[in-house]
Amino acid sequence: MGSVRNGYRERLVVAVDVGSTIIRCHVYNSAAQICGRAEDKIKVLYPCRGHVEIDPEELWEQFVNVVKEAVKDAGIHINQVAAIGISTQRATFITWDKKTGKPFHNFISWQDLRAAELVSSWNSSLLITALHGSCKFLYFFTRRKRFLAASLINFTTQHVSLRLVWVLQNIPEVRQAADEGNCSFGTIDTWLLYKLTDGSVHATDYSNASGTAIFDPYLMCWSSFLCSILSIPLSIFPPVEDTSHSFGVVNPSIFGTPIPIRALVADQQAAMFGQCCFDVGDVKLTMGTGTFMAINTGNNLHTSIAGLYPLIGWKIGNEVVCLAEGNASDTGTAIKWAQELNLYTDVADTEEMARSVPDSGGIYFVPSFTGLQAPVNDPYACASFMGLKPSTSKSHLVRAILESVAFRNKQLYDTMRRETSIKISKIRADGGVSNNSFVMQMTADLLGQVLDKPKHTDMSSLGAAFLAGLAVGIWSNKEELKKLREPELLFEPQRKLKDYENTIAEWELALQRCSNWYNDY
């Protein structure tokens, strides 16, 4: 179990990763080995069309339970835990009453589409047009990237900004509390921290804040300008702290001992840290519920044209690491959906099914249950199978779904190369879908790059553990962390891109056919 070494009790780190569908807790020793684990399925609610929610109290109960179960599984005493690190899905938020701590509504998920109409109207508004024009003018004279970024700004449903505006417009209690200074806003990390400290700490970190699209990464603070034009009171937002920081201690009544909370980090940035992508040009490809491809841009924020998003990867003391990220929302979602339709029994069967046919038989799948993100940027696109015929088999359908994942990876990679002009040094893959060798090999072929998959693919959890462990001295520096990372497989390109050109062209035609489908939303 690794809990006792040479007669003394080893100090351990607990890391909790709150993903989009699963909440996991791992207990790590100083060799970054997992000593204990527990997980639970997050119940995602779909109260009406386009709305995606999570019950905050139920999530809190699950958080407490998985920590207790993982510690029990490790066979350790809770006071051996030197620190806890928390990784969470980004841009899923809640508001609550400052005085009572009672939530005004459920968590509104990053996949939620209720603000689609607001997004459309704001992006086509005279105000945004004027903003684009004035900021282009300012950029021309000042050459400040902040003005260039503002000249290109467009809202999306994944941004917290307009979903929060929707809440303020449609839930009167929230608007009243905000006007009275009695409303607290938080992403999942902030809510869990608030609960763990029994309501005494309201805070977040730079990685989570930068994923909201309300935070100005150029000024490293909440955007007073954006809040002003959207009528969002700045008073509702939490203070922003370093990613590796002393956030307080867990109230002893919860686990029986006051565990230091030493890291809050957004899940994709946590995975980047867990993969040891510390150098400029390092790329991390996470394929879980959605796909997230991010490149380390050092201390330079990327200004996007086609939808790559500039993020703060982490801030530790004076070190600020920036990322440029693109994403596709429906990766694991589409694969899981196929299972629910009985297209396959076990996810491990999908590789064999895909390889049992020479191609997809002219079938193309558009993975767009929640729209298409960069570089397409169409929130109204629909999911679809195209090219169905009487000879179509389950294997053809499964292969088409897996191919669509690789095709979206190719789109994100091409956008990243075109926009950043940074030489890519390595690509490291993780997330549940990275265990699918068909997807991994096809992605390696399409990108013309070697993909490095680690032994353990839960990198968000490991990243949170690394950040917390560094803070309490379990690990000394990043060089030590690099030695702890365990690669398992390397996927090298086996076919040339030209072998796929016709297939990609036809799939892109399918994307066009599905575009703007829900334009009456």
Image (cartoon, rainbow, N blue to C red):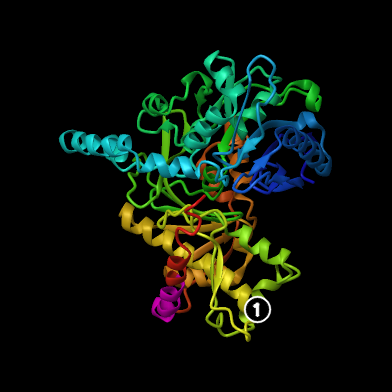
Residue 326 higher or lower than 161, as above or below = below
Is residue 194 visible in the rendered image? The answer is: yes
Residue at point 42%, 66% (across, down): 512
Tell me: 135 left or right of 199. Answer: left
Tell me: 443 left or right of 356. Answer: left
Would you say residue 502 sits in the magenta stretch? Answer: yes
The boundaries of the magenta stretch are 497-507
In the rendered image, residue 14, in percent from the top left (x then y), is placed at 70, 37
In the rendered image, residue 259, in percent from the top left (x then y), is placed at 71, 26
Residue at point 67%, 77% (across, down): 394
Query: Which of these two is toward me, 28 or 152?
Result: 152
Would you say residue 290 sits in the magenta stretch? Answer: no
Q: Amino acid at mark 1?
A: Ser
Q: Quadrant of residue 109?
A: top right
Residue at point 55%, 77% (across, down): 363
In the rendered image, residue 325, in percent from the top left (x then y), is placed at 44, 49
Query: Which of these two is toward me, 408 or 232?
Result: 232
Q: Give the residue furthest to the left.
A: 141
Q: Main secondary structure of the magenta part?
A: helix
Residue 341 higher or lower than 416, as above or below = below
Is residue 5 visible in the rendered image? The answer is: no
Label 1 neighbour load within 10 Å: few <14, some 14-19, many 20+:
many
Secondary structure of residue under mark 1: helix
Q: Circle 1 is placed at which residue position?
A: 395
Total count of labels:
1
Q: Quadrant of residue 196?
A: top right
Q: Quadrant of residue 59?
A: top right
Query: Which of these two is toward me, 109 or 517?
Result: 517
